[in-house]
Amino acid sequence: MSKLKWTSALAGGVLAALAAGSAAQACEVTVGLVLELTGPAGQYGQAGAKSVEMAFRDLNDAGGVLDGCKLVTDTRDSQSQGNVAVDQATQLVNIKKVPVIIGGIISSVSIPILTSVTAPAGVVQVSPASSSPTLTQLARDGKTGGYFFRTITSDALQGTAAAKYAIDQGLKKLAIIHVNNDFGVNMVREFSSAFEKLGGTITSTTPYNEKQASYSAEASAAMAGEPEALYLVSYPVDGATIARAWISQGGPQTFLLNDGMNSTDFIESVGAKFLDNAFGTSSGTTPTKSTEYFNGTYKDFSGGIEPSAPAADRSYDAGAIVGLAIAKAGSAEADAIKAAIPQVVAADGEPIFAGKDEFAKALELIKAGKPIKYEGVIGPVGFDEYGDITGPFRLWRISSGEVTTVGQMSAEDVMTLKDELAGK
């Protein structure tokens, strides 16, 4: 071979290699994650991030999306602060050009991301665990553009479910301590209205600001009126500090807790012996094959996080729905993904569950133009016009240091009760 031919062949080979490398790099779809990896909600975000990663691994092992492209994450820490979350989301949207952001976990992070970043930019946002009714109202007011979805039920319903459960457990005279943010204020408003209409008495309502060194003053204030129990609306770290202050000052060791407090860290920090009369509600689950798969796989994948960790189950579903929607959309464009999200949980679709084999089946059905219905770890869900899901509520209590499910309330039952109470 002449030197000229050899040089041309070498140059051609280099160009081909560069082109192949460029194609390989282009064959990745990056989804942004803005989650609370540190701060008061750090336990939620760490579990949630691992769940999304596991869902993407399963989808990639099943063949990937968009003719074999891999789903990858660019994960940012909101530090449980709205302003930090906005900065991180802005970078993901403006610099990384992501079509989807999964996050935040808590409403005080999700809301500023939505109003300041994703809705104005026309980027899809899926929250695994933000339950504030404000998010529904923003959609009603036309301020989300239809780009927001969540895999948790609204506190507008959960507050009513919690009130009914409290009354049914004989908790009729409660003090309330709640985190002073959008989530806490809305949850307490919905709960208080329902609880009093059901015949309960609220002796005091005490808001608190996050990350204080001590909550002795709040605990002391909440004891006015001789309550029989404490309704604590909080997160595991601050919640444990408040519960210890309440107990040390002689408060009754009977508690009603919000969804995020069914946490091993919370129980261990407070002490299991003090929580044998603690009850709570969560956005519930209807067990499916996905639940069984997740419970048997997640702990090893996550490096030891329990599958019952707050937000873990619904974060996997958020990741799965986003990934399947990208495949269904046929592109990594936000508008196409937005339209595809309700389609991957279509009521008339072929049931699809979590895991590599099921996702491979889903991807084949999508290629064939057939409808699918992903039935996830939290159960089968659908999205309404506001991006909300309707699903059951799980009723639980803490017994010997373990969170035990003791019942369930359907969304229909809660809606019926809410309508009845609205007439009182």
Image (cartoon, rainbow, N blue to C red):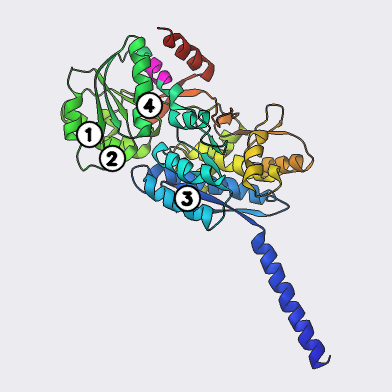
Pointer 1 or 3: first along the chain: 3
Q: Residue at x 54, y 29 (%)?
A: 388
Q: Amino acid at mark 1?
A: Arg
Q: Residue furthest right?
A: 1
Mark nearer the N terminus (4 vs 2): 4
Residue extending farthest top: 424
Q: Nearer the viewer, mark 3 or mark 2?
A: 3
Residue 118 lies, in percent from the top left, at: 52, 45
Number of the front mark, 4 or 1: 4
Looking at the picture, which amino acid does disc 4 mark? Met
Choose between 12 and 136: the one closer to the eye.
136
Q: Secondary structure at mark 4?
A: helix
Q: Nearer the viewer, residue 381 or 249?
A: 381
**Picture coordinates of residue 134 (x, y %)?**
44, 30
Tag 2: amino acid: Glu
Most common secondary structure along the magenta stretch: helix
Magenta segment, which residues? 160-165
Residue 108, numbered circle:
none
What whole-number distance in Å separates the C-alpha atoms at marks 3 and 2? 23 Å
Q: Position of residue 400 (x, y in %)?
A: 34, 29
Mark 3 or mark 2, which has the lower sequence index?
3
Q: Which mark is residue 244?
A: 1
Name the N-terminal-most of marks 4 and 3: 3
The answer to whether any part of residue 74 appears in the image is no
**Circle 2 residue:** 210
Q: Which corner quadrant holds the N terminus?
A: bottom right
